[in-house]
Amino acid sequence: MQKVASKHWKLAEKVPSEVEQALSYYPPFFRQVLYNRGITSTEQAIAFLNPGDDFHDPNLLLNMQEVVDRLLHAIDHQQPIAIYGDYDVDGVSATALLVETIQLLGGDVTAYIPNRFDEGYGVNIEALNYLKEQGIRLVLTVDCGIRSLREAEHARQIGLDLIISDHHHPFEEIPPAQFVLCPKQKGDEYPEKNLAGVGVAYKIVQALLQRRRQELPREGFGLDLVALGTVADVVPLTGENRMLVRAGLKELRRGWRIGLRSLAQAARLHLSTLNTADIGFGIAPRLNAAGRLESALAAYRLLLEQDVQQIGLLVQRLDDQNRERQKITSEMQKKAEELIQLEGFEEILFAFDESFNPGVVGLVAGKLAESYYRPAVVGHVNGEFVRASCRSIPAFHITKALDACADLMVHHGGHALAAGFTIHRDRLAELKQRLGKIAMDQLGDLDLRPVLRADVELPLRELHPEFLKYLSLLEPTGMDNPDVYFVSRNVRVINPRAIGADGKHLKFLVTDGWITYDAVAFRQGHWMENGLPKEVDILYRFELNNYNGRETLQLNVVDLKPAGVE
């Protein structure tokens, strides 16, 4: 199995003349950008570029009014409530948001976040028994539970009220909880089907506060956590999600939450200009590191902590854990690359080992999927069970593939591009064979190379600083609302050099003889070993680089090729 050496560049089709005319208020490059995003009229452009904060009515979610009734009854009668959250940033953010809200309303509330190593993902029976023993009367899940049929039935048997709130795809059968909130369940008419777990939690918060007409400690209460979890979970940043993140970024930039402000400083991020990339690559990995190596409770505590000294200790701990996580990921990736060569599958990658850290298998699967452009399954073998994470490519819906093998697994769940499962060790071989067959049927005849989609091709001399003003109107960018990518051809490379740890990255200047720009190419330091051509075609983002308080224009080169090579 060889890593993917080349990527296919796909340029967007040109804007039709009638759309050019309809969008004539905007410069030509931006008309192309808007058209690429399905915008063909001035009215659509205005709505897209000025999304506002007119969020959908939370009561459109199926069962919301009953959920609010039950929660307010528990709050008013001081019945102990547990918020049961997942251990990733989405789940931790949702847990913190609901704990903060219920405390504001005077309720008796605690958080429960399962330990990844001892309990695994989702709701488990032992945890429900423990919460019952602790006197908890009502459990509200966030970012998990929609496939916990057996666990919901157990809660009913032991007399523990259970409300499930989740955003994942359910089975045909819905868990027999007291109430279930999930925009993806049958019969739900909520307009935004792609909310993150924290997005569903925010809908509960909205409904609670509307019912109680509660005065908020500040405008935009909780939206910083919504932005954090939504971006970290890589859900589509379109529709209401885009509005939520846009509003949440404003709250994050204000720095109300001391823990996040301190974590941003540790990541050397500028709070006043914080964006989705800063969350995805700076803040979220540090918060996730807690749950990947030990317990996610440290991340949860940081989100709610007010004591400056405690915050300093927590930030240092998370930063240290993130560095350790990076080291472990690198070591596991090397081992996994050795293992996939032994499996013999062409369309899907498998790597299972007793030495793997179960908190990092998802990261390694993601790196394999990116490097080889194949769905990847990486798992930790522990006694009679295997816990695995999967990452996929757009042509292969990994959760549907797992659904077809559900009879082999203890439990599983996820999305189109990411999933996880637990399986008995003695069934692993059959699972690999069945997934391999599914992958072969779906991917066997495809050209498995990554497709990089570019918005605009233009000569380098036509790239102007004023473009950045228009690009900023597209924010927040992310899944299904991507950054703008340009292509410029036949540019000359000046002073290339490898930078970063082990020379993994590339820094250079590019010029077409008329204008010169700084350029950086992350994870492309290998060009220095193989010989970087003097003239190249580049696919890149145009951005403002802020380094040590100094702002410079920069091309962030995603891919490059020798000039004229397809």
Image: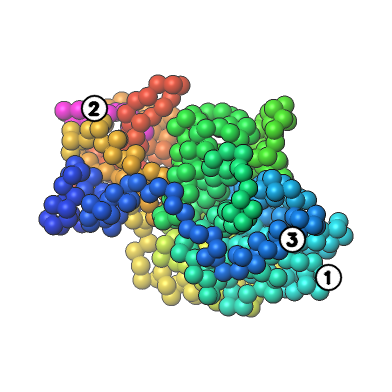
The front one of 238 and 189 is 189
Residue 367 shows in the view: no
Cα separation between marks 2 and 3: 65 Å
Judged left or right of residue 295, residue 563 is left
Q: Looking at the image, which residue is at 53% across and 75% down?
A: 186
The front one of 166 and 293 is 166
Magenta part of the chain = 508-520
Which is more foreground, mark 1 or mark 2? Answer: 1
The front one of 444 and 511 is 511
Main SS class of the magenta portion in the image: strand
Q: Vertically, is 54 above or below 284?
A: below
Q: Is residue 12 magenta?
A: no
Q: In the image, which disc is placed on residue 516? A: 2
Q: Secondary structure at mark 2?
A: strand
Label 3 sits on what residue type?
His
**Label 2: how many residues lie within 10 Å, few (<14), some (14-19) or many (20+)?**
some
Q: Are marks 1 and 2 in contact (CB under 8 Å)?
A: no
Lower sequence index among marks 1 and 2:
1
The x, y position of residue 277, in whole percent, is: 46, 41
Judged left or right of residue 285, residue 347 is left
User: Which residue matches tag 1?
Assistant: 158
Q: Looking at the image, which residue is at 50% across and 43% down?
A: 248
Judged left or right of residue 556, residue 372 is right
Q: In the image, which disc is placed on residue 399? A: none
Q: Vertically, is 117 above or below 308?
A: below
Q: Looking at the image, which residue is at 70% across and 40% down?
A: 301
Q: Vertically, is 272 above or below 482?
A: above
Q: In the image, which disc is placed on residue 73? A: 3
Label 2 sits on what residue type?
Thr
Q: Secondary structure at mark 3?
A: helix
